[in-house]
Amino acid sequence: MLWFLIRRLAQSVTTLLAITLATFILFRLLPGGMTAALLPPRTSEVVKARFVHDQGLDRPIIVQFVNYLDRVFLHFDLGYSYRRNQSVNSILGHDLPKSAILLSISTLLALIIGVSAGVLQAWRRNTLEDHLFTGFAFLLYATPDYCLGIVLIDIFALRLHWFPTEGPQGSTWTSAFTELNHFVLPLAAVTLTSIAVFSRYARSSTLDVLGQDFIRTARAKGASGPRVVLSHVVRNACTPIITLLGLSLPSLFSGAILIETVFNYPGIGLESFNAAVNRDYAVLLGITVVLGSLTVLGNLIADLAYVLADPRVRLS
Amino acid sequence: MSGIGDDAGGSAAKRYRGRRLEITRSALFGTTLSRIGFGLLVVIVLFCFLGPHIYPTDQITTNIEAVLDPPSRGYPVGTDPNGYDELGRLMIGGQAALKIGLLSALLATVFGALYGAIAGFFGGFPDALMMRVVDTLLSVPGLLILFVLVSIYRPTFTLLVIAISMFAWLVPARLVRGETLTLKVREFVQAARMMGATNTRLIWRHVLPNVLGTITVNAAFQVADSILAISALSFLGLGEAPPATDWGTMLDDGVSYQATGAWWLIYPVGGLIILTILAFNLVGEGVEQALADHR
């Protein structure tokens, strides 16, 4: 176990370094280089030269990279956005919790609904309900979350006036709860489109589990149907979903860009959209590094959780 | 190196090929799911590519006298903010989405499969290095990088195809590598190696044909994902410049006029995006089921 941990940690650190290196190089390859990227247009040559020197951009690239690593990972300083006149830390400190609250609540809801639906489907496999839900899941799976968001806005905001068209506009993440009626539609859009992934996985892994000997043993011991499902099936069917969760962070975030744009919800997705449109590379670089790190961390936790949840997994 | 096995068993090889053709046919059309998927696809492709010949419309010059007209006899799906006929626009928008989706999926699948096969086949340090590259790219939110690329360079057809394949090859690479790891220790590969087959031949003739099933299934899902990606990019205003268009751009236009109640600019195009993605997913799922039955 210890050896596995060490190896897995080493792997994560390498990936993290590679992400940083890749983004570092990518942003230096931009036309005009980092000065054009970070300074406002029409900056005088004197200021530019001063900036280049102060930022160490005239030093060898390897020194720059080491300095950058030192700044990001040892001092947690992601740089400064001259366009927003704010440190990237404070921008992300504002936005990240807002996206996190939207994505985590919707993922949790989707997980609960999806897994219960999948387990029930497997339990009553090949019945009409099973087929109907499979069809429904296929349709939801094919629906991009922003399409669903637009439809929800059209029906529930513009025509029925039940909910407002925009997401919560407050400056902190708590606005998700203080402006709950604003939060309902974005939450529904993300949740509904994520259900299908979980329900399909849960259905097929439950079918696998149901055919195994220990289920028959539990049945033979006289355990009731619901008891077998709750204490034996669900736990075993959940293991593949743990890995799925760990891997889904980048795609969740990509979805957040669109859904936050549709609902004008000022989280990290809308921030990166605006940063891309305004070519605010300091912010884009910061977001990429932070999200990359979160993904690496997520995968690491998922792998460990997988080992803990399923004692049959062999570490080799 | 094509001596020993190939000529001696000519008829056996023919029979083998016949059987493989049979498997392919039943994999593609054997399940209800894939038949529904293919049926949908045929309808969508005919609509987009044959449609403009049956229902020709002017999609170049704007028409200021027919702006945002609701569906009527003259305009079955209404008109858009520039006075273009929305039905005709749905057709040419679909062409762009389908072409970019199919091309980038093809590019990504071929590159990813080769990459994965090579990494898995050689193993050891090259494999570790190559897979770290994949892990790295998988940990970066692709849409964000696509954003940066497309916001710097003017989005053209070629750039969009390349940009989307850049993040699409990772999954096939991983899948093919995994299968190659188990294939390369199998007897028939070992036997071919004993007979003196080169590495290139082993990968080309013995590994890749055996991962074809996995590749096909993934390719179908990949097209769906690529169409999703191109629609997302153009929905955010990063698609090809007008008068060219695609479904994502059209949906974006529709959203701008959503508050005026122009439902015909949202529902038809949204429905087509969903149906197309659904069709490719159904094909992928169907082929996967058929292949599972064969094993």
Image (cartoon, coloured by chain):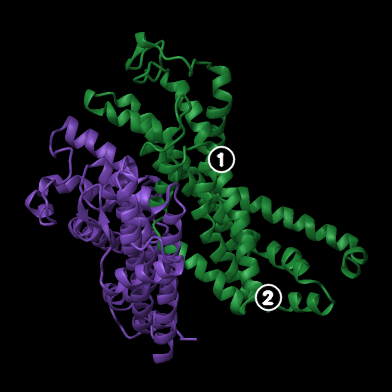
Chain colours: A purple, B green
| Vertical comparison of B236 with B182: above or below | above
Q: Which mark identifies residue A233?
A: none
Q: Which residue is mark 2?
A: B184
Q: Is residue B295 left or right of residue A2?
A: right
Q: Amino acid at mark 2?
A: Lys
Q: What separation in Å lies between label 2 and label 1 (alpha carbons)?
A: 36 Å
Q: Which residue is mark 1?
A: B158
Which residue is at a point 32% across and 28% down the rendered structure image? B254
Q: Does residue B39 show up?
A: no
Farthest-out residue, top: B65
- Residue A90: x and y in percent read 18, 59
Q: Amino acid at mark 1?
A: Thr
- Residue B27: x and y in percent read 62, 53
Task: Tell me which chain the residue with mark 2 is part of.
Answer: B
Which residue is at a point 43% across and 81% down the rendered structure image? A10
**Which badge, 2 or 1, comes first in the chain's sequence?**
1
